[in-house]
Image (cartoon, rainbow, N blue to C red):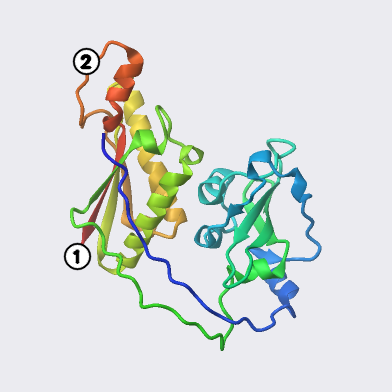
Amino acid sequence: MNEMPHFSLKLRTRKFWLLPLLVGLSATASAASINTFERAVTFPEKAKVMPFLKDDFYGNESDLNNLRTGLNKDQVQMLIGNTHFLPKLMTDRTWHYIFKFRELDKPDIICQYQIQFDEQMKVSASYFNKPTCVFHLQPLPVGTVIETEAPVAVPLPANAQLSLPTNMLFGFNKSKLNDLPEAVRDTLRTFVQKLKANIATLEGITIIGHTDRLGNDDQNLKLSTARAETIKEFFVLQGVDAEKIKAVGKGSTAPLNECTDTDRKKLIDCLAPNRRVDIEFKQE
């Protein structure tokens, strides 16, 4: 089986001193309703969070910054996961989260976060329960002192291809956005940063979905295409230009493993390397 590729990206530490910004924050929130603070917005009691989230999740600032109006619920799940509080109904138009953010030389800050959906179940607004939470996602004010390390080079792999085993992406017969595990999202986020860092010389990206031979040809073609389209959508949500990405499915026409097991479970396991997504890219 192919191993999940591992990338390491060194994070830069920022040391800064924020000027008081509370004055006028509500006015800013009225003008821009994504990732803002409004005193009138109410949040559920923290004690009502799902039991397995009692210790809170660390918020991914990059993903939260990619949230925008017009996204549907599947796309929100792709970026930041499902609501941390049980919705009353499947048609619930507010999702709530609890995130931690790391503070320099201070204890972690805990923030509640709310996403509001319109009648078409598209994102219409999002709010934090504290102004200090907004600062983690807002541009730093003019005059802020910033100390950083030198930028870290993030070259793309030399072989111009990344192969992702689908059993580690979606699981058997899976292809949707909310089927993507968090560990795989982290790998893809890091790869996206490499793509974006090289976007000036990147001619194009081709995402190719594959399946094993189980099922008929039409089903496999649709499934492989759906897997490729899902990864494309993830890249677009992360800020990669959709015009540079092509998603195609090849069904079961390019297997890596040939298996003869008669036991279905063993056969599915043996065919796992064939259920994959290949990401090819071309540079100038």
Picture layout, residue 93 above or below residue 261: below
Q: Secondary structure at mark 1?
A: loop
- Residue 63: x and y, percent? 51, 57
Q: Residue furthest top?
A: 262
Q: Earlier in the sequence, mark 1 or mark 2?
A: 2
**Along the viewing direction, whichever of 238 and 226 lies nearer the viewer:** 238
* Amino acid type of the residue that numbered disc 1 sits on in the rendered structure: Glu
Residue to which mark 1 is pinned: 284
- Residue 237: x and y, percent? 47, 54
- Residue 127: x and y, percent? 69, 60
Which residue lies at the image location 27% right of the left edge and 57% below the top edge?
A: 204
Q: Is residue 79 visible?
A: yes
Picture layout, residue 52 above or below residue 172: below
The C terminus, quarter of image:
bottom left
Q: Say whether residue 138 is left or right of residue 241.
A: right
Q: Secondary structure at mark 2?
A: loop
The quarter of the displayed image where residue 27 is located: bottom right
* Amino acid type of the residue that numbered disc 2 sits on in the rendered structure: Thr
Q: Nearer the viewer, mark 1 or mark 2?
A: 2
Picture layout, residue 40 above or below residue 162: below
**How far is disc 1 from disc 2 in space, using C-alphas?**
43 Å
Q: Say whether residue 262 is left or right of residue 102.
A: left
Local packing at callout 1 (Cα closer than 10 Å; few below 14, some 14-19, many 20+) is: few
Residue to which mark 2 is pinned: 260
- Residue 268: x and y, percent? 33, 21
The quarter of the displayed image where residue 53 is located: top right
Which residue lies at the image location 56% right of the left edge and 46% below the top edge?
A: 81
Which residue lies at the image location 31% right of the left edge and 49% below the top edge?
A: 246
In the picture, the disc for residue 145 is none
